[in-house]
Amino acid sequence: MLTSGCGGGKASPPVSAPTGTAAARGGTSRPAVVAGTTSHPVTLHNLTVTPAVRGELVRAYVVDRGYQPGWIVGTEPGSVYYAYDPSTSSYLAWAGFVPAATAPQQVGVGLQDDGSRTAFRRTAGGSWQVYDICTTPRFLAFVGGRLPAGGTCPAP
């Protein structure tokens, strides 16, 4: 099981960072230029979040955590960031999740204090996998440097 928590340090600041909430509310796609690890910026394409993508992220989160399917009812409003990274031919997402009222207490407790915030990656034709957001500094910048509670990234 992979987690999205990391070690210690800071990511490069965005050159021009999207808020992510327009896409999370079904806004239009637009390129977002964020700082790369070289002198050339990397363009991540901000994508519209569809109900299908939300459902896929919920399923991936449930599987990764070993939860029963009904324990998570969806994504937190305004929490989903979704982008395409042409440099790796992969899709990236960041989301927070909402527990069902019937979920065990430990599930609800685990989701408190940004505990549900999770990064995902998938390649074309693949399935969403939880991954370490610190391995992609430009996506970390794209989501505004958000990490799970207590998470930090190792210095480069």
Image (tube, rainbow, N blue to C red):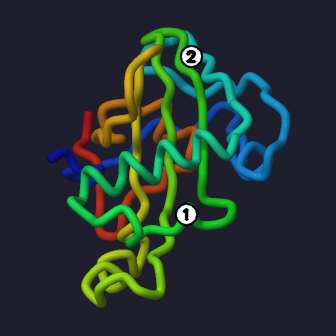
Q: Amino acid at mark 1?
A: Gly
Mark 2 or 1: the one toward you? 1
Residue 134 spot, x, y in % from top left: 32, 40
Q: Amino acid at mark 2?
A: Val
Residue 51 spot, x, y in % from top left: 67, 46
- Callout 1: SS: strand
Q: Which picture quadrant has residue 133?
A: top left
Residue 38 left/right relative to 30: left
Q: At 65% across and 31% down in the image, what residue appears? A: 15
Residue 111 spot, x, y in % from top left: 38, 75
21 vs 75: above or below: above
Q: Which residue is mark 1?
A: 74
Q: Gap between marks 2 and 1, in whole Å? A: 31 Å
87 vs 33: above or below: above
Q: Which mark is residue 42?
A: 2
Residue 41 left/right relative to 1: right
Q: At 61% across and 23% down in the image, what residue appears? A: 44
The quadrant the C terminus occupies is top left
Q: Residues within 10 Å of mark 1 (few under 14, many from 20)?
A: some
Residue 46 spot, x, y in % from top left: 69, 30
Instruction: Give the mark, 2 or 1, whose residue is nearer the N terminus.
Output: 2
Q: At 44% across and 15% down in the image, what residue appears? A: 125
Residue 39 left/right relative to 6: right
- Callout 2: SS: strand
Q: At 66% across and 23% down in the image, what residue appears? A: 45
Q: Which picture quadrant has residue 31?
A: top right
Q: Camera-side residue: 20 or 38?
A: 20
Q: Camera-side residue: 43 or 127?
A: 127
